[in-house]
Image (cartoon, grey):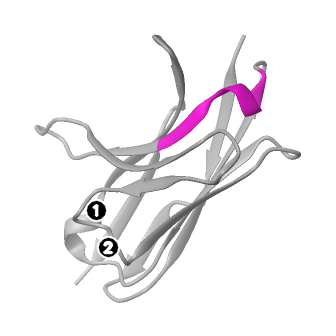
Amino acid sequence: QAQFVESGGGLVQAGGSLRLSCAVSGLTFDMYVMRWHRQVPGKERELVATISRFGDNTNYADSVKGRFTIARDNAKKEVYLQMDKLTPEDTAVYYCNALLGRTEYWGQGTQVTVSS
């Protein structure tokens, strides 16, 4: 059974940085595209960043392009989201997600709060 341990969330001032980590077990990690999503209460979950199986291709939402960087370490079975130049609009619960075809798994989420 897939398990996710997310960490790195917290409270930061606008303009600051945070690095989210997601450690995955219970699946063949390098078979999965990994993604980070975020959700604000009352709004739909938003896809933030995607990284291909071996990290050679990444994609970002326009709202975070140039500020966020997704990376993965297949040997450690971890995926990361480096978040720089944070703004209050980045405040959300951030979720790690593993995708293989129609199969996907989700982490429990980690709260990121950016104060103005």
* Residue for point 63% across, 54% down: 56
Q: Please give the residue where the numbered disc 2 appears in the rendered image.
A: 114
Q: Amino acid at mark 1?
A: Thr
Instruction: Return the residue found at the far right.
Output: 75
Q: Is 66 situated above or below 59?
A: below
At label 2, which amino acid type do we have? Val
Q: Quadrant of residue 16?
A: bottom left
In the rendered image, the residue lying farthest to the left is 42
- Which quadrant holds residue 91? bottom left
Q: Neighbour class for label 2 at 10 Å: few (<14), some, many (≥20)?
A: many
In the rendered image, residue 33 lying in the magenta stretch gets the answer yes
Q: Report the span colored magenta.
A: 28-35
The quadrant in which the C terminus is found is bottom left
Residue underneath mark 1 = 91
Determine which quarter of the picture holds residue 86: bottom left
Q: Is residue 75 left or right of residue 101?
A: right
In the displayed structure, would residue 3 be above or below residue 48? above
**Above or below 45: residue 38:** below
Residue 88 % position (x, y): 22, 73
| Residue 24 x %, y % | 73, 34
Q: Are discs 1 and 2 less than 8 Å apart at CB?
A: yes
Q: Position of residue 95 (x, y in %)?
A: 45, 41
- How many residues crowd mark 1 within 10 Å: few (<14), some (14–19), many (20+)? some
